[in-house]
Image (cartoon, helix red, strand yellow):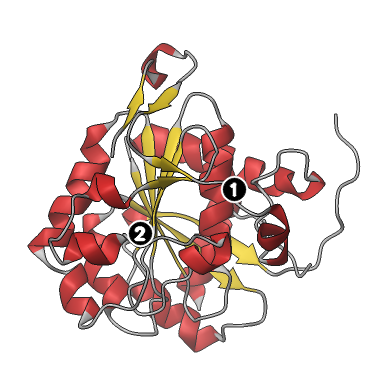
Amino acid sequence: MERIKVAVEKARKQGLVDSPAHRSPVAVATTGAESGEFVDINYSQTDIVELDREHLKNHRILAYDKDNQSSWMFDILRTQVLQKMEENGWRTLAITSPNPEAGKTVVSINLAMSIAHQTQRTAMLVDFDLRRPKIKTYLGLKREKSLNDVLAGDIDIAEAMVNPNIPRLVILPTNKPVAKSSEVLSSKRVESIITDLRERYSERVVIFDLPPILAADDAIAVLPKIDCVLLVIGNGMSNQREIEDCMRHIPDASLLGVVLNKSEMPTRTYYY
């Protein structure tokens, strides 16, 4: 248990321990983030869809609406994550948890949306939880094409992407579970996809929603291919041994931070 305590304390000192949720084809960037200018996107081929705000609210997707008073939690997390990634030259981020139901997918979606709202970055969210893909369900997407078709070699990545009517954000959903998911995630095909997504745009942050580490070996198979890891721990949902086992599979150098999710906290009703 000492290692997780050290990791959490280290992350806390760096401002990376947060509690952001409580119970409660090709896009082209016209300017670059390196210049500190506004990054604009022209979606010439990517499908643009309108999401249902009530559906998002029911699934705790708060960052879609900047007027939502609870979205500030993810804006704080966004700033902390981007600062740490920029320090290390990281562009790809894995989000995972020790166990199911910790809220990693909710954190992934909200963080991606918050990054997209930040005008000097673009964000891409990829559903790599091939056993239990949930991003499509949480967003209410109704798509015929998805990552399933990309992995099967039937379409290019660009054909499966969708923009949820938020500038600077694209989603690569997975429609249904993938057989032999661990073998797929450890394949050269997936490694090539990750490299392509990472290198295509310098201002893009690619977030991969991974399966829980202790649920199977899927996350362990793909983690070495991704720059850094954000670990989501559900408040009271993981015991000491589970957290210790989880931390053994995350290299210290790539652990970006720890998020304590589903903690009780008051809603902020004022702004500075």
Which residue occupies the foreground of this view, 132 or 234? 132
> Residue 54 at what x, y percent from top left?
73, 58
Asked which quadrant contains residue 41, the reply is: top left
**Residue 248 visible within the image:** yes
Question: How far is the residue under mark 1 from the one under mark 2?
Answer: 15 Å
- Which label was assigned to residue 250? none
**Residue 258 visible within the image:** no
Which residue occupies the foreground of this view, 72 or 141? 141
> Residue 236 at what x, y percent from top left?
67, 81
Which residue occupies the foreground of this view, 260 or 58? 58
Q: Is residue 102 left or right of residue 68?
A: left
Mark 1: amino acid: Lys
* Residue at which label 2 appears: 252
Q: Is residue 17 left or right of residue 33?
A: right
Above or below: residue 93 compared with residue 85: below
* Residue at which label 1 appears: 13
Badge 2: few (under 14), some or many (20 or more) residues near its Cα, within 10 Å? Answer: few
Please, which residue is most extreme toward the right here? Answer: 269
Above or below: residue 270 compared with residue 54: above
Q: On the rendered image, what quadrant is the C terminus found in?
A: top right
Q: Is residue 224 left or right of residue 248?
A: left
The residue under the point 35% across, 52% down is 228
Asked which quadrant contains residue 68, the reply is: top right
> Residue 38 at what x, y percent from top left?
49, 16
**Total marks placed:** 2
Q: Secondary structure at mark 1?
A: helix
Badge 1: few (under 14), some or many (20 or more) residues near its Cα, within 10 Å? Answer: few
> Residue 124 at what x, y percent from top left?
40, 45
Above or below: residue 213 compared with residue 51: below
Mark 2: amino acid: Asp
